[in-house]
Image: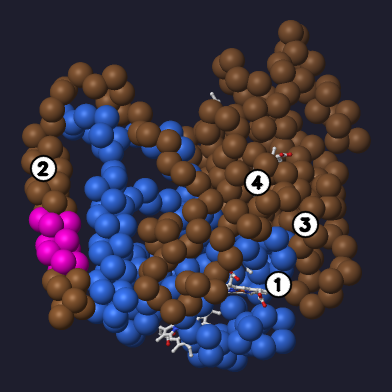
Chain colours: A brown, B blue
Amino acid sequence: MRDILQSLKFITLLFVIAAALLVAGVVQQANAAEPKNPNTFNRLLTPKKPFNLPPAEDGYHDPEGEGVAYLQPPKEAFKDLVKSNVGNHVDWVKSLETGKINPRFDRLDPKAKPIVMDLNIVREVKGSMPNVVYPHKQHTEWLDCSNCHPAIFIPQKGANQISMAAILMGQKCGVCHGKVAFPITAKTCRKCHSQPKGKKKGKAKKTAAKKQE
Amino acid sequence: MNHATRCGRRFALLLALAGTLWLTGQPVQAEYGDLVLNENAEKEGMPPVIFPHWFHRIRFRCKVCHADLGFQFKAGGSGINMLKIIDGQYCGACHNGEIAWSVENCNICHSGKPGLPTQVIGSRLGKLAPPGPTQGQQK
């Protein structure tokens, strides 16, 4: 008898919760239907979102799927890596340089070493932004020449038309940056635009030539 | 405590949890660089595949997949399917029980929510609220 009473109590409690949720839901919907204040402080800026969420909570993995429990939460993997404030919130270049990670260059041979080429290409930028230094070194740590040449870039200095618009549309540097390599945001402009412009016009070119030697 | 009350309590807890998530508007943000691959999976009755770039780049350089194994720089662009995978191509070059766990663990790859289209989870930084006579409120 007591058991039945207790169950009943719980069922009533459930009903109360369900009713409360329903009311809250209706209120929320009503709010969404007619926006209250047209002069909120931020109209367009979206609130900061949490990052490195565990798979079951990231909105893409199905939390009911049988495999999700096996997946590693990114935070656990990134614990000892060098941090950044964009993308995966990992500085992949520094994590590699400092040996925090040692990804294989060959599928089978853990000892295979990458063929790294140290060649900077300076691209003079119109307007006020610093010149772009494209570093082959950091790229060939990860990538093969054939990943970029010739499909994305003709291997000849200045032979390629590159613009910010194209990059933001996912072409040229934007094939990778903004998708898997670090994204294009105000926090990363200077990673690419890293060479201050010389006062004289010829100066940037000279340093460029020197760097290539 | 008997079974019914225990169940009831658990259920109430679950409901409350679900309720709070629902009320606060669950934040949605998969890991940067994750891919959803769903060219055929869902059409053929399997959930979409979610491929984590971050997990694999800790173990392999891009070159291994994008030069040696022929993955294109475009989600859905390489024509991956299960036959090629069991024949040792694409994911099957590693998910063969030797380099990594094998294909019979369907749900570890096919782990996406139903209905997701093929896509790359790119940068959301600086993305604006949708235009229109609205407010700063956003999901």
The lab-note entry on whether marks 4 and 1 share a chain reads no
Q: Residue at x 52, y 40 (%)?
A: A167
- Residue B18 percent location from the top left of the image: 28, 59
Q: Mark 2 Cα within 10 Å, few/some/many (few <14, many 20+)?
A: few
Between B1 and B101, the one nearer to me in the picture: B1
> Mark 2 sits on what residue?
A27
Q: Amino acid at mark 3?
A: Ile
The residue that disc 3 covers is: A101
> What element does badge 1 sit on?
helix
Question: What's the magenta region?
Answer: A9-19
Q: Which residue is mark 1?
A: B68
Residue position marked by numbered label 4 in the rendering: A90
Q: Quadrant of the N terminus of chain B?
A: bottom left
Instruction: Find residue B85 and report its image quarter.
Output: bottom right
Q: Find the distance from the CA under tag 1 to the CA under tag 3.
A: 21 Å
Q: Which chain is mark 1 on?
A: B
Residue A122 sits in quarter: top right
Give the residue type at disc 4: Val
4 and 3 marks on the same chain: yes
Residue B110, image x, y percentages: 44, 77
